[in-house]
Amino acid sequence: MNDTPRIRTVLSCTLLAAAVTAVASGCGGADGHPLSAKPYDATRQIAFNTPSGNGRVNPDKPLEVTAKGGDGRITDVTAVDESGRHLAGELSVDGARWRSTASLTAGTRYTVRVATEDDDGAPGVRTLTFETSPTKGALTVKFGPEAGKYGVGQPITAELNRPVKDKAARAVVERALKVRSAPAVEGGWHWVDDKKLHYRPKEYWPTGATVDVSGNLAGLKVADGLYGAPAKPLKLTIGDRIEAVADAGSFTMTVRKNGKVINTIPVTTGKPGFSTRNGIKVVLGKEYFVRMRSTTVGIAEGSSESYDLPVYYATRVTWSGEYVHAAPWSVGSQGYANVSHGCVGMSTSNAQWFFETVRPGDIVRTVNSAGDTMDTFGNGFGDWNMPWDKWVKGSALTGNGGISVFPASTARLRPSV
């Protein structure tokens, strides 16, 4: 008796399989072939609005695919360029026509696969390849900084060769600029002006991270008559988290590495009338020797404030000439008073140690100074002084894509002491 249910189950499954086989045998085209048969050649059934022969397609015009003569219909169209980008489109309800809804990529080759079915339901296929015309007006992008190892505060820059003002066009550009980091972090682009974008994470880059920057603009339509050009990718690695805080109130600089204090240095900062800028700055570069002249910052030669000094171990933090550097002439004031013309001065041995410890991208922050706050843009990298909620509003994708204006008079290479 225990075997009976088992036998009945086997018999039921056998009958079911036979029934399925019978149904499958009855499903086919007019010629009796099942739907899984090799699709027929639909060349005579399908037409394209592309030039005959080897003529190139105008990327400003949409691609159209039509079913000819009312014999069958289009069921699906897939159009992909040589970079793997899919061309979006819409298929009419009756399957008579497919039309692209996105712009074609300029100067590339497309492969178009059209699936059809005839009046009897048999599947067909036609494949077409064509090239689009290259563009004369190309939008190029150059990423910065140069490839290498940087501190946790280093922003990414993207400089365009042409202005992009329209928000929709900015969105096209921004979507094509890719920043990937390992480990992954939240970040975003901010339009500084019509031709420049900056990218930064919400917080500083993680120590040991790798950052890959690339552009997918090649051939992409940005605006009427304007297409993107290929971009050279960029790769950065991120070093230890070095943060130096210059306290103008206590005349000291505290340097931390990965959160741990590694040095406390007596310093002098800007005196009244020449106060050091408050806020976060990013190391721009290091110069073993700089000749600093007062005339470069608007101080007349021969005045009581004029100077012309050889300066060593100079770590630059603004383009207008603010450095952390050796100031042996003010050692007696370091740790006690602010007597500089805006720079952070320290002894030669301390300046050498600082010079050898930091790299571009490291953080230098000034607090408790009477000076203005570091500009966000235009005088180095003050990006971190902008709150994150305001930063994202400078994106054409998540914010208003507005322009952040900075003083046009800001000059480069103006050292102060």
Image (cartoon, grey):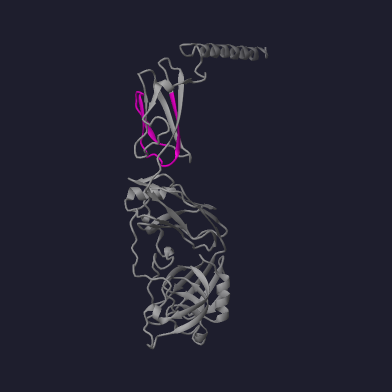
Q: Residue at x 48, y 11 (%)?
A: 31
Residue 233, placed above or below residue 84: below
User: 62 or 85, which is in the foreground?
Assistant: 62
Quadrant of the rendering where the C terminus is positioned: bottom left
Q: Which residues are magenta?
A: 87-115
On whether residue 224 falls in the magenta region, the answer is no
**Residue 417 visible in the picture:** no
Q: Residue at x 36, y 54 (%)?
A: 162
Q: Residue at x 47, y 53 (%)?
A: 186
Where is residue 143 shown, x and y percent of the image?
A: 46, 56
User: 70 or 371, which is in the foreground?
Assistant: 70
Q: Residue at x 43, y 54 (%)?
A: 141
User: 249 or 180, which is in the foreground?
Assistant: 180
Residue 197, placed above or below residue 175: below
Where is residue 274 shown, x and y percent of the image?
A: 39, 80
Q: Quadrant of residue 321?
A: bottom left
Q: Quadrant of residue 194?
A: bottom left
Where is residue 145 shown, x and y percent of the image?
A: 49, 60
Q: For this view, does 256 lie left or right of residue 190?
A: right
Quadrant of the rendering where the N terminus is positioned: top right
